Amino acid sequence: MRTIASDRLLLRPWREEDADFLLDLESRWEVVRFLGARPTLLNSREDALASIARRRAIDDPIHGIWAITTATDRQLVGNVLLKPIPLSAGEPTDGPTDVEIGWHLHPDAWGHGYATEAAAAVLDDAFERGLTRAIAVTNPDNHASQAVCRRLGMTRLGRTTRYYDTTNELFEKLAG
């Protein structure tokens, strides 16, 4: 998987040596509480290593799950993803697969604009590689992620139950 750079960030593949950071990140309820219909906490280093293996298994020229690091000191700050989004049970599977942009950051990194910068860099890269549309879904109560969507220039399409078996606010960004 490729590395993507922005002004202040380096987005790179996850590594096994990132397991302690990932465990710290995803063992925090305030970080995972808005992830999916049934958020779950990581409970062990072994769980973190397994999660890293799944992230690294994505072999696609556009999609990926990247560790977000600062460019100056390579400090890990979070996670950004661009991948096909799972449909809710019973949703029709005909038509093109929707691609989701998403992020979550360590609380120490909140409020620095890293989520917006990382997501913008991934979207720019993906659009240059031929992606024509990306969506983001947020829990209706996740106002911080909705603000990131607006800063990314995404259009709010309203509430949906089409993804993750739960109600989300749906945002869209088109290439160009």
Image: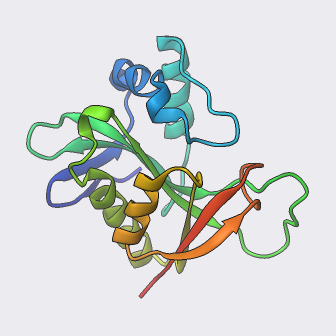
- Structure colour scheme: rainbow
Viewed as shown, does residue 92 lie left or right of 85? right
Outermost residue, left direction?
A: 72
Q: Which picture quadrant has residue 168?
A: bottom right
Outermost residue, right direction?
A: 90
Q: Position of residue 94 (x, y in %)?
A: 85, 72
Viewed as shown, does residue 49 lie left or right of 73? right
Residue 139 to residue 110: above or below: below
Q: Which of 174 and 54 is in front in this view?
A: 174
Residue 137 to residue 123: above or below: above
Identity of the residue drawn at 64% across and 72% down: 158
Identity of the residue drawn at 46% across and 83% down: 175
Identity of the residue drawn at 39% across and 36% down: 14
Viewed as shown, does residue 41 lie left or right of 81? right
Q: Where is residue 93 in the image (x, y as percent from the top left)?
A: 84, 66
Q: Which image quadrant: the C terminus?
A: bottom left
Q: Position of residue 24 (x, y in %)?
A: 38, 20
Q: Where is residue 56 in the image (x, y as percent from the top left)?
A: 49, 38
Outermost residue, bottom direction?
A: 176
Q: Which of 67 and 28 is in front in this view?
A: 28
Q: Which picture quadrant has residue 25?
A: top left
What count of labels does the image hold? 0
Identity of the residue drawn at 48% across and 63% down: 62
Viewed as shown, does residue 161 lie left or right of 21? right
Residue 175 to residue 90: above or below: below
Q: Nearer the viewer, residue 66 or 150?
A: 150
Q: Which of 137 and 48 is in front in this view?
A: 137
